Image (tube, rainbow, N blue to C red):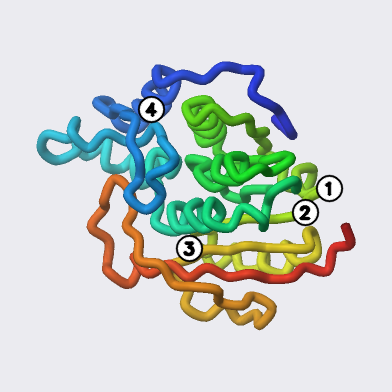
Amino acid sequence: MLALSNMKIPMTKDTLIQNIQKTLSKGDIAVTQPAGCKDISLYLFNPEVLEGPLSHDEAQAVVAEPAYWSFCWASGQALGQYILQHPELVAGKNVLDFGAGSAIVAIAAAKAGAKRAIACDIDPDALDAALANAKLNDVEIEISDDLDKALSDIDVIVAADVLYDSENMPFLARFKEAAPLIILADSRVKYLGDDAYELQEVVTCRTWPDLNEFEEFNQVRVYHAAGTADR
C-alpha cells in the first residue's frame, strides 16, 4: 500500500505511455487542455493513434481494465473549474480528491491555494498520472491508495464521477462523517437520495477526448454537503 506519498518520485510521459500500452499496444498520450477546464493541462489519451477498429484482444483488455485516468470525464472538468472559480472553498485547507483519476480536481485545489491536496485512487496507474499531471501544472500534490488513512485530518472532500457504480452510493454517508464539507459532481445519478447534498449548479461539459456519450451524461450537477466531522 502506498498510503500517503508526495511528489518525490518523478513521473514522465513515457511512464504513462507504458501504462496505457498495457491494454492498447498502440496507445499514446498527449498534453491537452480539456475544454471544460482550460486552465489545467493534462496527459490524456491521444485519439490520433486509432486507425481502424481495435483487435479482439485489445477490446477485451480495454473493457476489463479501462484506463480511466487517460480521459478527463465531464464531471472532473466541471468540478475542477468550479474549484478554480471558488477558491475560498479550499484555500488553506486539507483537500482529498476521491477517485482522482487524472487528478484534475486535486490539481485545481492545489492551484486554488489548498494547504494539502491529496489524490486518492486504487489504480496505481492513475496515481502515476496524478503525479505527472501535477508536475505538468507546476503544483505539488500527495497521492494515496488507502482511503482510511487519507481521510484523516481532512477539511474538504471533492469527488467527481464516482457514482457510476451503485455500490459506491454508501460513500455519500461516509464522506459526511469524515469532513466538514463535501463537494460532489456527477452526471450519472439524477437523484442522490440524500438531502444533505444540495444542488449548486448544473454545467454542460463533455468527456475529453470526446467519447460521444449520450447527451444526458454531459449535464453535470455540482452539490455541496455539510459533514458532521468536527475540525
Task: Answer with mark 1 or mark 4, whichever residue precedes in sequence.
Answer: 4
Give the residue number, with chain letter if any, for mark 1: 153
Residue found 56% across the figure and 17% down from its top: 10
Give left or right: position of 186 versus 116: left
Q: Name the front one of labels 2 and 3.
A: 2
Dot 1 or dot 3, earlier in sequence:
1
Residue 173: give x, y in percent of width and height.
72, 69
Please give left or right for residue 77 compared with residue 223 in the image. left
Q: CA distance from mark 2 to mark 3?
A: 25 Å
Q: Which residue is mark 2?
A: 155
Q: Is residue 34 left or right of residue 4?
A: left
Q: Nearer the viewer, residue 225 or 108?
A: 108
Q: Quadrant of the C terminus?
A: bottom right
Q: CA distance from mark 3 to mark 4?
A: 24 Å
Q: Which mark is residue 22?
A: 4
Question: Can you name the residue that lies furthest to the left here?
Answer: 52
The mark that comes first in sequence, 2 or 4, is 4
| Structural distance between the alpha carbons of marks 1 and 2 | 7 Å
Q: Amino acid at mark 1?
A: Asp
Q: Amino acid at mark 4?
A: Lys
